[in-house]
Image (tube, rainbow, N blue to C red):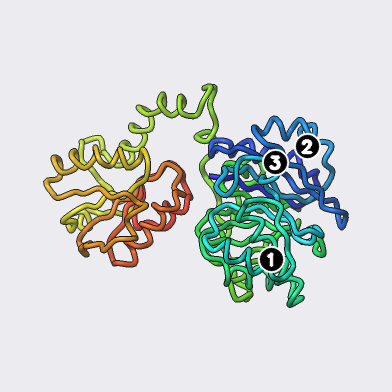
Amino acid sequence: MCGIVGYVGDKQAAPILMDGLKRLEYRGYDSAGLAVRQGSGRIEIVKAKGRLSALAEKIDGGRTLQGDCGIGHTRWATHGEPSERNAHPHCSDDMAVVAVHNGIIENHQELREKLERNGYRFHSETDTEVAVKLVDYYAKKYQGGPVDALSRSMMRIRGSYALAVLFADHPEEIYAARKDSPLIIGAGAGETFLASDVPALLRHTREVYYIGNLEIARLNKDGASFFNVDGEPIEKPLTHIEWDAEAAEKAGFEHFMMKEIHEQPKAVRDTLHAYVKEDGSIDFSAAGLDEEAARGVRSICMVACGSAYHVCVTAQYVLEDLAGIPVRTELASEFRYRRLLLQKDELVIVVSQSGETADSLAALREAKRLGCRTLAIVNVVGSSIAREADSVL
């Protein structure tokens, strides 16, 4: 899953952006890039294929890329091979719009053809360049400003996205838009931050806003303002982050996988201690699942992807043996595309390490739409799945 960072304030942006991207390395990536500007000056873009060290070498760790406002990205290739040409940020030909993007734009070919008919040319194989030029198209056609251009683009785009956008005519500002892919805004003193996950922000602030689906944000050094997809202003509460980012750091291990293998016993103990009392009784009320609700469960459906799915296949046998009720396991990627015979008294358990797995999040929302109680088991506090499930471990 790609990583997004953004900064606007009085400090040099590039070193802050590089540090944020490094804290998102656990997501995996094959290329990286920054777009930075000073005041109303020209937006400068630097990209590199491979590890962040390749990008850092180009800009001396960020010190040679001057500017107090910028966005950054680590890319995991979906449309187009890993290359500097396909790396983010992408821009309109006149540099009026520059953006980074997480997610998948499902109708990118249709939008590309529309834009080509209107004189646009494409230089990468990515769906992101299509999004950038669609925003540029609406900005120039209607002259309604960044929020209007993003709103019109969101109406046309099908799929998932988290967008961070710089507009040449709006210095000292970053604009963001979200549908399904995670995006968080951090509030500091005279500076504002943007990231796709909390660890990128915690060195600078613990006060964050969560952008909802189909919402737009405008960031400047004084804070953030928010709009719905119709461009109408909305209010968002600040949330204080209690936990630290140690779980997303390597903690001295060479690889994240090795770290996770070694910390499994502690992770299991820490999780169980919250619910297993000293007398051996089990109380899930702290997770939002009280005894009455638990006794009302007549069957369980477990939903996940990848290795989390394999865990569920094993857990199915354990749960049936211990609880004496039927349990089945579903692949999240198939869950919403078939006729689901879910019962109102069925508990749907969604398992995701990141709490942001797109198919698992979609399965959670489908289960809730069908009226089922949902329980999430995730590793990341404040992730989308953790926030949207009825109960969470």
Q: Name the residue at 33% across, 31% down.
A: 269
Q: Earlier in the sequence, mark 3 or mark 1?
A: 3
Q: Is residue 152 left or right of residue 190?
A: left
Location of residue 151 by image quarter: bottom right
Q: Name the residue at 87% across, 58% down.
A: 40
Location of residue 238 with respect to 31 vertically, above or below:
below
* Residue 115 in picture, x, y percent from top left: 68, 67
**Label 3 sits on residue:** 84
- Which of the labelled discs sits on residue 116, or is there none? 1
Q: Name the residue at 80% across, 43% down.
A: 12
Q: CA distance from mark 3 to mark 2?
A: 18 Å
Residue type, mark 1 in image? Glu
**Label 2 sits on residue:** 62
Q: Of circles 3 and 1, which is in front?
A: 1
Q: Is residue 334 left or right of residue 195?
A: left
Residue type, mark 2 in image? Gly
Q: Does dot 2 land on a helix, a strand or a loop?
A: helix
